Image (cartoon, rainbow, N blue to C red):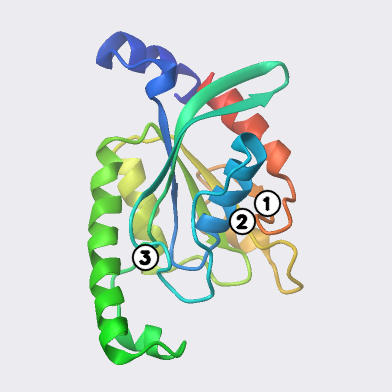
Amino acid sequence: MIGRLKKILSNIFGKTEDDMSIGIYGPPNAGKSTLANQISQDLTGEEMSNVSEVPHETRDVEKKEKVEIEADGRSIQMNLLDMPGITTNVDFKDFKEHGIEEDDAKGRAKEATKGIVEAVKYLDDVDACLVIFDSTEDPYTQVNVTIIGNLEAKDIPILVLANKTDLEDSDPERVRDAFPQHPVLEISAKEGENIDKLYQEIVERLN
């Protein structure tokens, strides 16, 4: 299915390779923006997103256009989208725990909620998704199952990433066990581990 994506887009929707978009989805603090910055810095020389320990630091869809990925003598060009963290509940108290004043915290919570709605709407526009999970935590949650289920329902090609393998309590097998129907790649977005393998997977699956 994934290998036919470019032909399907070209023949049915009139989309060209340059129009293709890949979205980075996942729950808050899974490492989406860290991965987006790693890829963007690697391939364009510029970062694209703010990274913070504060949840929902990315509250709008961040976009980097015409990112060219090369691997094994092949290349593709696409738009890279860093999505806000998906969750069913945004509580302003989560921001206050990080020293943010209440009024500002409430404003951020409102922005984060709008960002989640925007990210869900983008499911109609993305051509493939990297779904990133924190491998130090149990990935089998209602939110994560919902993320995967929505992508499956829309028949969007998925590559699951087990992130934070640089940490001692990382357990990527939990991610594989939770979502055995999808390929899982172990990475450390922070340390850049296995990012070259990620490029290979993206190029192979979208060519």
Residue 143's tag is 3
Residue 141 percent location from the top left of the image: 42, 69
Residue nearest the viewer, comparing 128 with 67: 67
- Nearest to N terminus: mark 2 or mark 1: 2
Residue 149's tag is none
* Numbered label tally: 3
Mark 1 to mark 3 CA distance (whole Å): 21 Å
Residue lying furthest top: 11
Q: Mark 3 is on which residue type? A: Val
Left or right of 182? Residue 173 is: right
Near mark 1 (Cα within 10 A), the count class, few <14, some 14-19 or many ≥20, is many
* Relative vertical location of residue 74 with respect to residue 179 in this rendering, above or below: above
Residue 162's tag is 2
Residue 102 percent location from the top left of the image: 30, 91
Residue 186's tag is 1
Residue at image point 66% right, 59% down: 173
Near mark 2 (Cα within 10 A), the count class, few <14, some 14-19 or many ≥20, is many
- Nearest to N terminus: mark 1 or mark 3: 3
Q: Mark 2 is on which residue type? A: Ala
* Relative vertical location of residue 180 with respect to residue 65 in this rendering, above or below: below
Mark 3 to mark 2 CA distance (whole Å): 16 Å
* Relative vertical location of residue 116 with respect to residue 2 in this rendering, above or below: below
- Nearest to N terminus: mark 3 or mark 2: 3
